[in-house]
Every structure is written in structure tokens, then in C-alpha cells.
Amino acid sequence: MAMRKLGGLEITRPLLAVALVAMVLLLVEMSGTYRGLSPDVLLNATNRGDLRVDCSASFRDERPKDRLLGGLLSPEFDEASCLSRYQSALYWKQSNHTPSPYLLRKLRNYESLHRRCGPNTELYNKSIEQLKSNASAGPSECNYVVWLESGGIGNRVISMVSTFLYALLNDKVFLLKLPDDFHGIFCEPFPGTSWILSSDFPIQDLDGFDISHPQSYGEMLKNNLLRNDMDPAKQSLPLYLYLYLIHDYSDFDMMFYCEEGQRLLRRFAWLFLKSNQYYVPAFFLNSEYSEELSLLFPEKATVFRHLSRYLLHPTNSVWGHITRYYQSYVANAKQRIGIQVRMFRFAPFPFERMVSQIINCSLTGNILPEIVEEESAAPTTSGTNRKAVLVVSLQSGYFEKIRNMYYEHSTTTGEVISVYQPSQEEEQHTEKQSHNVKALSEIYLLSFSDVLLTTTFSTFGYVAYGLGGVRPWLLLKPENDVEPPCRQSLSAEPCFHFGSSYDCKTRKHVDKGAVVPYVKHCEDFAWGVKIVDETLLIRSH
Ligand SMILES: *[C@@H]1O[C@H](CO)[C@@H](O)[C@H](O)[C@H]1NC(C)=O
Ligand SMILES: *[C@@H]1O[C@H](CO)[C@@H](O)[C@H](O)[C@H]1NC(C)=O
Ligand SMILES: *[C@@H]1O[C@H](CO)[C@@H](O)[C@H](O)[C@H]1NC(C)=O
């Protein structure tokens, strides 16, 4: 990608070109070599002991119940109004990644801020009146960031989690402009208040905010109507700003990730933010936040896990789908394996080859047993020695292949392999509420897996393994038969696909995967970066 000068803020670039470059990059990266990665480090990490899969996991219900997730959740809620809130803990694979006391304090403080400033409070009404009066007042006791949706459920969830972290870091109040197809999906996360922007909000065309909105931060910088170092005592600031952080954004929009941009944004009482990205890694690269983040997350690669478990609670109707399916098919297995296959039209991959890659990965990683070709040699099978495999895909072909393989043959280990697929929608329909209910149910079912295999680049998969805190086996596109069919990721964090390579301090483009040890290029998309578990890096040296 050509180097772009940004210091003078005089460069504009046709947006179409950005989108095209992104797509080309995507195609190149998905079919070609994974430049920017250091494959040795990654390979070593997978070779040293990680190929073993722990088969000793017992039934979930026998575990001690940590209903508040190590203090992450407030005990204040009425349990029956949202069963998933305190029951999810029973289903996720157990681990010792407890949230830090600092994070817990931060969340409790956030909750009291939200209660004070949330919709229909006196302070909220006051802030709304200010917005209506059209008199720029600057920041006050209550400052808001309103999340606007973009993309499918995976994109929405990763951007919600990122925006919530942004709010936490800046003592802003996090509100949602809830799209119709997202009603009845999630419970309220903050006690005694709401996270939904009231319907009588004075700015009515929020859904129509797009890339070239006149009050977009990037547009205003570009047109010299705003400067990051503006002195608000001398020049009045606009009433609100719109932040456009979607993958086809401009270098000006990306100034959001810079220290100076962050400082300016604190002067606004109202921000509207639209993103389809997991932009959390950008905060880890921002000197304004790195210290606070290391207190909040001493284990850096647990951000998504903790924040998503704090924020997202399926409503009772969605939770019913999840738990009924779980009890019917998955509950009594000695191990749960999730396989998620997402094919993108822009990066087609032959069906048979993907099936073979899934099977090769499962065998190499000791995730699934080999089959016996000659039936007479088969050991006796036993129903108590059962592994449940949950296949999640828009198509049914992958599921059928794997199911038939274990239906037509016994296994060399005598294990029984049950294979299930909850739904086959064929097409993604984010605009349908019923589709989102199914999609979220399947994300949760996958997140309960002990082991996860996923295809590359799918934000749906990211949410499933991030929520479960399960480091996935990524089905990378192998160049040849010598390459391993998959690699276990260095963390369960989502990949930040389209960030900025601009270094705000030196005003040069840098390799963002080489700035700090805990932010590396994604295994499944080399242009992007993700937070990795440093202890795995050390172990692999
Ligand atoms: C804030 O305004 C809403 C409607 O505009 C009203 O219902 C509510 O009572 C007000 N809150 C307070 C604390 O005055
Ligand atoms: C609000 O103020 C700006 C300038 O400060 C002006 O351009 C705009 O027309 C005003 N809007 C309303 C609704 O009064
Ligand atoms: C899977 O393994 C078999 C046998 O080793 C090999 O022939 C095949 O090419 C592999 N498939 C993929 C997609 O790597």
C-alpha cells in the first residue's frame, strides 16, 4: 500500500479507491502468503504442547457456580427478568482468567454514572435541552457516546464492545440507537437504568448518518472546519460529532485513534459512533490509555472475554433457544467441539477442500479421532465416551460430510462422535430479527465449546470464541500439503481488520504489529492486528 502523507491534512482520497484497496488486500491476503506474520513464532506456539486437547472436562453442572463471573456482574438484577445473566457461567468452559479488582471498581463506578446520566434522568433531560437549544456548551457532568449499527451481528457486537471500552476509558455514557431487528435480543446490562437512546431524541435521522455527513469528525478535519488542537475558549465547537469508523474510512476519520484526536473528543457532550470493527487494539497502542488499560486488564488478551460477558446477555426468549438446544444435543458429551464455517463470496474456496481441511485439522490437533476403515477391527463403542460436534454454517454440506464420516465408520478410539447443526439459513439476513435470534443462539452455543475450529475473517466466529475465551484453531488457507491445515491462535481476541498504519507521534506510517509485544498481526488476516497472550509468545521462544 502506498505511503500516504497525513501531517498536513491535505490529502483526500476517493473512497471508492479505499474500498477497492481493502477488497484487493483481502483477496490477496486470503489466497496468498501471510506476510507480516512471523510464522515461526506462530508455528512453535502450536507445536509445543498445544496440540493436545483436554478431554477431562466433566459435565458443566458439576462445577461450583460463579454466577457473578468473578464479580464482573452486578448482583442487583432480578434474576428471572434475564436468566442468561447469572446462568451463562454454568455453560462456559472454566478458566482461571478472573477480572482484575481495578476493572470491577471501574464497572461499578460506570454503573453509577450511567444511573445518574441515563435516559430520562434529570441530567439527561438537561443535556437533551442543550442539544435542542443549539448552544454549544462543551462537556458537562454527563457526556454521551451513542453507538450506531453497521453490518451483521458479529460486526455489531465487536463494535459495541469496542465502543463500550471507549466510553469506560473516557467516563462517557454508552447508549445504543437500537435497530428494529435488534429488539428483544439483549437484556439491559446496567442496573436501574437503560442503555437505549430514548425514541424522542431530538436528532431523528441518526440512521441516515453516512460517510460524508457534514458533522463527521473526518469530514470536518478534511475541510478545515475542525482542528485537533483547537482552543475551545477561542473557537466554538460543533454541538456534536459523528465518528465514522467503518472499514472504508479515510485517514482523517482514523485520527480518532490518535492521542490528539482523543483529547479533542473529550470536549464533546454528544458523540455518535458508527463502526463495524473491533478497534480495541488501537487503544492499546495509544499512550493516553496504555497505563489505564494495563490496570484494567493485567491479562491483556482478556478484554473481549470480560467486556462481552459483562455487556451481552441474551433475553429469555433467545436464552430458551440456546439452553434447549444445548440440553437436547450437547449437554451430556464428555467434550464439546464447535466448528464454524463461513464462506465469503469474495474469497471462494472449494467445498471438498474445506471439508478435507477441517478433517485434517481435527486429526492433527487430536480434536476428533480417526475412523476405522475395516469394520472388523473396530473397538466397542460406548455412549458415555461421546464427543458432541456442533457445526455452524449457512450451508449444510460440511455438517453432512462430517456426520456421515462418523455414521458410516467407527472410531479407532471407540469414541462416539455425534454431529449436529442447529440451522441452515443459506443466506445472511441481518435485517430480520428472527435471523439475529438464531445467529446469536449459535454464537452462544459455539462459545460453550471446549475446542473451536473456525474459518478465517468471520466476525461471527470472533464473537463465539471471544465470548467463550477459547483460543480457536484457525482454518487458514494452506499453500500446499506440507503446511499445517490449521493453527491455534495466540489469543481468543477478535482481529481488528482495518486499522490505521499512521503513527500519530512521528507522523509516519509504521508496522502496527511491531510496536508492542502484545499487539501482533492477525493469523487469519495479516493486514489486521490483534491482542495476543504474551505468555504464549515467551513460551514459543
Ligand atoms: C425527562 O423527560 C422525560 C420525557 O421528556 C420525562 O418523562 C421524565 O420524567 C423527565 N425526567 C425527569 C427526572 O424530569
Ligand atoms: C444551529 O447553529 C448553527 C450555527 O451555530 C446554525 O448553522 C444552525 O442553523 C442552527 N440550527 C438551528 C436548528 O437553529
Ligand atoms: C489432508 O490430508 C490428506 C492426507 O494427508 C492430503 O492428501 C490432503 O491434501 C489434505 N487436505 C488438505 C486440504 O490439506
Image: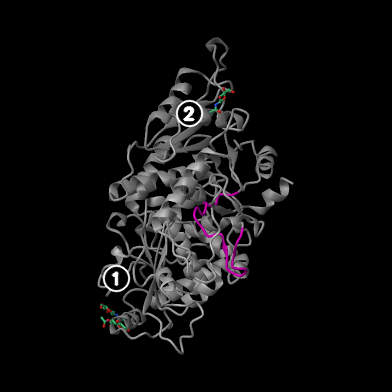
Which residue ends up furthest to the top in the rendered image?
Answer: 376
The magenta segment is 491-510
* Label of residue 355 in the image: 2
**Magenta stretch prevailing secondary structure:** loop
Which secondary structure lies at badge 2?
A: helix
Confirm whether residue 341 shows in the render: yes
| Circle 1 Cα neighbour tier, 10 Å, few/some/many (<14 / 14–19 / ≥20) | some
- Ligand 1 within 8 A of label 1's CB? yes
Q: Which residue is mark 1?
A: 198
Confirm whether residue 70 shows in the render: no
Q: Is residue 92 above or below residue 241?
A: above
Left or right: 236 in relation to 109: left
Q: Is residue 100 magenta?
A: no
Ligand 3 shows up in which quadrant of the image? top right
Considering depth in this image, is 426 or 136 the residue closer to the camera?
136
Q: Is residue 346 above or below residue 301?
A: above
Q: CA distance from mark 1 to mark 2?
A: 48 Å
Residue type at the position of mark 1: Ser
Residue type at the position of mark 2: Val
Which residue ends up furthest to the bottom in the rendered image?
Answer: 234
| Circle 2 Cα neighbour tier, 10 Å, few/some/many (<14 / 14–19 / ≥20) | some
Q: Considering only order in the chain, which callout, 2 or 1, is on the residue closer to the N terminus?
A: 1
Tell us which disc is closer to us: 1 or 2. Answer: 2
Q: Is residue 388 above or below residue 16?
A: above
* Label of residue 9 in the image: none
Q: Position of residue 36 (x, y in %)?
A: 61, 48
Which secondary structure lies at badge 1?
A: loop
